[in-house]
Image (cartoon, coloured by chain):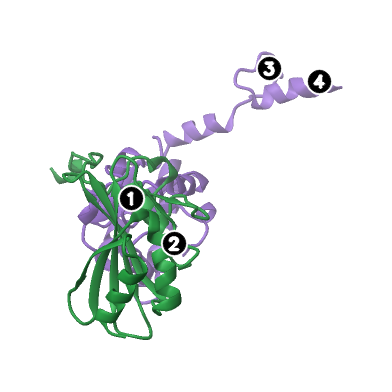
Amino acid sequence: MDAKTIIESLTREFPEAVSKPEIESEIRIWAYVDWAKTKEVCQFLKDSLQFDHLSNLSGVDYPKRNEMEVVYHIASYAHPVVLMLKAVLSRADPKVESVVPVYWNANWYERETYELYGIVFENHPDLRALLLPEEMLGEWPLRKDYEGFPNKTARNLV
Amino acid sequence: MGEVKSKKRSGAFGEAPNDTIPGVLTTTSGAICNFLKKTKAQDLINWGRKNSLWFMTQPMGCCGVEMIAMGCAHYDTDRFGIIPRNSPRQADVMLISGYVTKKYLPALKRLWEQMPAPKWVICFGDCSISGGPFYESYSTVQNIEELFPVDVFVPGCPPRPEAMLQGFVELQNKIKAKKDRGTEY
């Protein structure tokens, strides 16, 4: 299955949810996906298009656009195509459906994205902080407007 | 009977015994300790302490590898009485050998409280001194010396095991000169 076939079958199955698909090269394609339909798209990708490996899940903050994005990199063992899905969320209330029922390894990725960006993954089995201490929840340190960095250098240096 | 026992106990261990036993001088272990600190006996005690600095093997970052290398046979730290111990209850020296994150700080404090006095701290590596390459991070704790009584800083990224050994020797010199922060003189 090549990149063009994948894009065509994806847009045919979800004509409204999937938008702006692009073929970057033969092995890299990407598309925007409606945040409410993320889980259904992933289920279709896994069941029908042999995308059986979620290799990455992360978040991006765009304060000027007042938007946040969740980025899914989904790869396959059957064909050499890596698909990048982007779900655009509102910055005031970032939430998206969890894909843990589809890809089990999304569990820790989603917990990390939650603790660093504050993106809530609905119906996640165990949504709590992964690496940060519990009391740092609510600071969301990887957002662009985070101001909790230490503004003093250590005393020993100066 | 119970009344007599409690009276005796207050005389032997209490802060200010009201009724003294005739012919017997009562004191406390703290008073003996404070008295010994003013005498030459403290020099002997410090000689013993400085020659048995057992450190806790608690590697926290890549400097912890240097700590393990120093504890192995090649550097032969036994000649200084420096022996790695696995339990904080048997250790005298805590090496902070890496950056301290906000999540790890409670565990580090707990390890420090588990160590019996007298105890000393050595900051090993740039990370523990100032945060090192991570000094601007959102999760790094800075200025460790405000949280622990640090005696010796060993700079380097990471320092060689010889530098760590030199840090121990400096700590021994401080204990010998009664200038260490592990004991109140």
Work out whether B27 lies above or below A47.
Answer: above
Question: Residue A56 sits in which quadrant?
Answer: bottom left
**Residue under pointer 4:** B4
- Helix or strand or loop: what does disc 2 sit on? loop
Mark 2 to mark 1 CA distance (whole Å): 18 Å
Tag shown at residue B17: none
According to the picture, the residue beneath numbered tag 3 turns out to be B20
Counting from the top left corner in percent of width and height, residue B129 is at 25, 50
Q: What residue do we see at 18% from left, 46% from top? A: A65
Identify the colour of chain A in the image. green
Residue A131 in percent (x, y) is at 40, 54
Chain the render paints purple: B
Instruction: Give the percent coordinates (x, y) of residue A96.
Output: 39, 52
Number of numbered callouts drawn = 4
Q: Mark 2 — residue?
A: A99
Examine the rendered structure and indicate whether residue B32 appears above or below residue A89: above
Say which residue label 1 marks. A116
Chain under label 1?
A
| Among numbered discs 4 and 3, the one appearing first in the sequence | 4
Of A42 and B18, the residue lying toward us: A42
Question: What's under tag 3, amino acid-wise?
Answer: Thr
Which kind of residue does numbered mark 2 sit on? Answer: Val
Please tell me how crowded label 1 is: few (under 14), some (14-19), or many (20+) other residues with Cα within 10 Å. many
